[in-house]
Image (tube, helix red, strand yellow):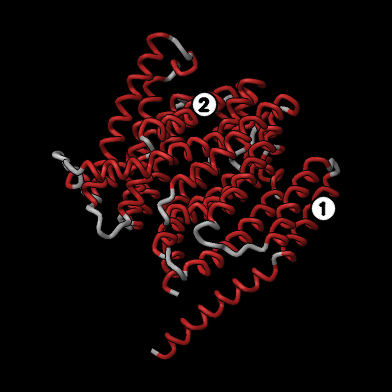
Amino acid sequence: MKKYKYLFKNVGLLTISNFGSKILSFLLVPLYTSLLTTGEYGTYDLYVTTASLMAPVLTLNIVDSVMRFSLDENSKKNEVFTVGFRDVLRAGIVFVVLVAVNYGFGIIDIFNQYPLYFILYFILSVFYDLLSQFSRGMERILDLAIAGIINSVSLLSFNILFLSVLKMGLSGYFLANCIGFAIPVVYLVIRLKIWNKVVFKFKNKPLKKEMEKYSTPMVFNTISWWINNVSDRYVVTWLCGVADNGVYSVAYKIPSILNVLQNIFSQAWTLSAVKEFNDEGAKFYSDVYKIYNVGMVMVCSVLIAADRIIAKILFANEFFGAWEYAPFLMISVVFGALSALLGGIFSAAMNSKAYAKTTVLGAVINTALNIVLVWKMGPIGAAIATMISYIIVWIARIIESRKIIKVKINFKKDCFSYLLLILQSVFLICIENTVLRYIVQVAFLIVVFLVNIKEVVFFAKKVLNKIAKRRETKAGV
């Protein structure tokens, strides 16, 4: 039971770390959509998604190596961090030069509107990522959780101050998010005593080479995930305009509820996957996959059913139309979550090439489908393209992971559940009568629950037995 206790303890702490900021970004949507125009929100989204693309390219995705190599018991943590720190610092300098060149020559005009915020956001976000991954590798999960709380409080306070009180508009939105990274960065620097972790006379070139050998294929993995996640917004901007991209980008806020669960579990799972990578690991991986799959499917079904209700609460004015895109994006999160769980096996085996190969396949298909479907169907085509590409990544990772460890999957039952989610989404969009729409949605919820009831009962019994044992232990004491 130790391995399950370790996993769920980390899930709990990482929930504290991530839940606040993720849920906060979700709850602040009414503020954004009432105080920013669709064009302003679309502009901000392009800046952030571009920064998220440049980060892995310029850093060689070294932060993944920092986390993985820090987990090795025999590694010298200060040397591992130094490699990451140097690569991230170099990336920041290169990014400043690129933005300056773009500003001087006017290559891409939209990125010349807020160049200083662009630089500040990039530098702070990559350093926060580096410190977060190092904290995970050092198993300083409590410090990471506190940094997450600080991030949440900062985001809430400064977004309200700059947007609602000072009426700073898009500049205030940029500044609030930059400060939201800066304060937890300072906290982690102090808590981890980073000044003691940087080796100024670094001579361990074999370690640097080994870390970059592991992280370089991860660049393709991260870029491919970026393509799967956000390339649709560029295609929507290109074919439909910035305003439509603003609406489409807001649609991601509903799936972000599901994405919070996926991100939290994925971070905790990587630590457990590395620790349990042995001959007995297959059963542990299979049990976790089974429970995780059911949980994601059932939460997704609930969110699809509540999609329009959530949209009415969150989305102001012309942003309300985003509800149509959310169901297919939510299904893509389910497959992304399962792909990330299988990816934990690649991380444990230090097989970064398998990571890259599977996600590149999805990215290529995603790009082609985006252009075709957005051209034919508008923004909803982008949501469908994203869903299909995630399904392909999931299939590819099942095939690749079985070369390492065979995770037992009930394909017939699981695929039937996924089909139900797709049909539920289609009926939500196609049925215009409100009463009939929700009758059908409730019916789908019931069927999804019944299909997965065996796993629900199995998990419930596990939890109840654990509670009963604790009570017996306390009674004995």
Compute the Cα span from label 1 to label 2. Answer: 37 Å
Q: Residue at x 41, y 14 (%)?
A: 102
Amino acid type at circle 2 is Leu
Q: What amino acid type should be assigned to the residue bearing mark 1?
A: Val
Q: Residue at x 71, y 32 (%)?
A: 381
> Which quarter of the figure is the N terminus placed in?
bottom left
Q: Residue furthest bottom?
A: 476
Whether residue 16 is visible: no
Image-quadrant location for residue 477: bottom left
Q: Position of residue 264 (x, y in %)?
A: 48, 53
Q: Secondary structure at mark 2?
A: helix
Residue under numbered circle 2: 46
Residue 212 as seen in the image, left or right of residue 351: left
The disc at residue 440 is 1
The image's mark for residue 98 is none
271 left or right of 430?
left
Q: Nearer the viewer, residue 257 or 201?
A: 201
What crowding class fits label 2: few (fewer than 14 Cα within 10 Å), some (14-19), or many (20 or more)? Answer: many
Expressed as whole percent of the image width and height from the top left, the position of residue 45 reads: 52, 29
Which is nearer the eye, 424 or 160? Answer: 424
Q: Is residue 48 left or right of residue 58?
A: right
Occupied quadrant, residue 296:
bottom right
